[in-house]
Image (cartoon, rainbow, N blue to C red):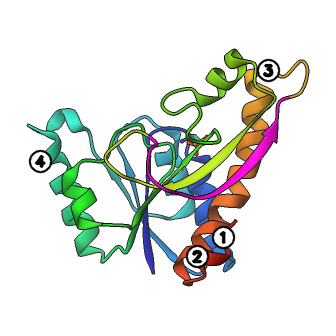
């Protein structure tokens, strides 16, 4: 199966998925990185990993529809089976949602439905909760709202900082995301937890 990863930032999850695919623990091909931010480090990572990147700015398109049509054209020509969002900071619109029904997933740094949207880590710290975590879910038209596939909890300890919590969360993300993808792609969805 062929995967396109969408990212807007550092791309550490993109890298974890790509390394898992290259090492064989994830039986899939990472065909493309789609990045909406030309300066994002994810683009450098793609180059280092030898993975093609589509760097595409929505501001160069008349509409979200036109922007997504351009992306879709590339995904179709590469015969991409699945879209994996990893720090992609935009809502997916109808063009991609309708072309990839049930085949777009996202990772979010909280136990959804708690703390959707931006800076979920800061939101959890500000709320003073003792536990937060990571959720992998199907993508629908909402922000971090689709059905959950897997989640993992992370304790917030005394003296926790944004940086320390982010580090713990990302460590889990980097192992959980490739693992869940492997299970999804091999039809063992019921075993995901
Ligand atoms: C991750 O923490 C992910 O949960 C969130 O955005 C972050 C992306 O980090 N959606 P990176 O770009 O993969 O390093």
Answer above or below: position of 53 versus 39.
below
The residue that mark 3 highlights is: 161
Alpha carbons under labels 4 and 2: distance apart: 33 Å
The residue that mark 1 highlights is: 192
SS for callout 2: helix
- The residue at 22%/62% (across/down) is 98
The residue that mark 4 highlights is: 66
Mark 2 and mark 3 lie on one chain; the one further toward the N terminus is: 3
**Residue furthest to the left:** 62
The residue that mark 2 highlights is: 189
Circles 3 and 4, Cβ within 8 Å, touching? The answer is: no
Answer above or below: position of 113 versus 4.
above
Circles 4 and 2, Cβ within 8 Å, touching? The answer is: no
Judging depth in this view, the residue of 132 and 77 nearest the camera is 132
SS for callout 4: helix
Mark 3 and mark 4 lie on one chain; the one further toward the N terminus is: 4
**In the image, which is nearer the foreground, mark 3 or mark 4?**
3
Report x, y in % for residue 38.
37, 38
Mark 4 and mark 2 lie on one chain; the one further toward the N terminus is: 4
Report x, y in % for residue 68.
21, 51
**In the image, which is nearer the foreground, mark 1 or mark 4?**
1
Relative to residue 83, is residue 29 drawn left or right?
Answer: right
Predominant SS of the magenta segment = strand
Alpha carbons under labels 1 and 4: distance apart: 36 Å
SS for callout 1: loop
Alpha carbons under labels 1 and 2: distance apart: 5 Å
């Amino acid at each position: 199966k062929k995967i396109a990863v969408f990212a807007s930032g550092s791309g550490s999850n993109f890298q974890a998925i790509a390394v898992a695919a290259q090492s064989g623990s994830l039986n899939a091909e990472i065909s493309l990185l789609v990045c909406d931010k030309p300066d994002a480090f994810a683009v450098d990572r793609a180059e280092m990993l030898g993975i093609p990147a589509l760097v595409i700015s929505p501001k160069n398109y008349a509409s979200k529809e036109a922007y997504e049509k351009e992306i879709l054209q590339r995904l179709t020509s590469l015969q991409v089976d699945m879209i994996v969002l990893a720090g992609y900071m935009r809502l997916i619109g109808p063009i991609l949602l309708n072309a990839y029904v049930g085949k777009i997933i996202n990772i979010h740094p909280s136990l959804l439905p708690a703390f959707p949207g931006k800076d979920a880590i800061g939101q959890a710290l500000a709320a003073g909760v003792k536990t937060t975590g990571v959720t992998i879910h199907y993508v629908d038209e909402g922000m971090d709202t689709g059905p959950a596939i897997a989640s993992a909890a992370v304790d917030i300890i005394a003296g926790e900082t944004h940086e320390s919590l982010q580090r713990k969360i990302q460590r889990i993300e980097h192992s959980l995301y490739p693992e869940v993808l492997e299970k999804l792609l091999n039809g063992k969805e019921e075993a995901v937890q």
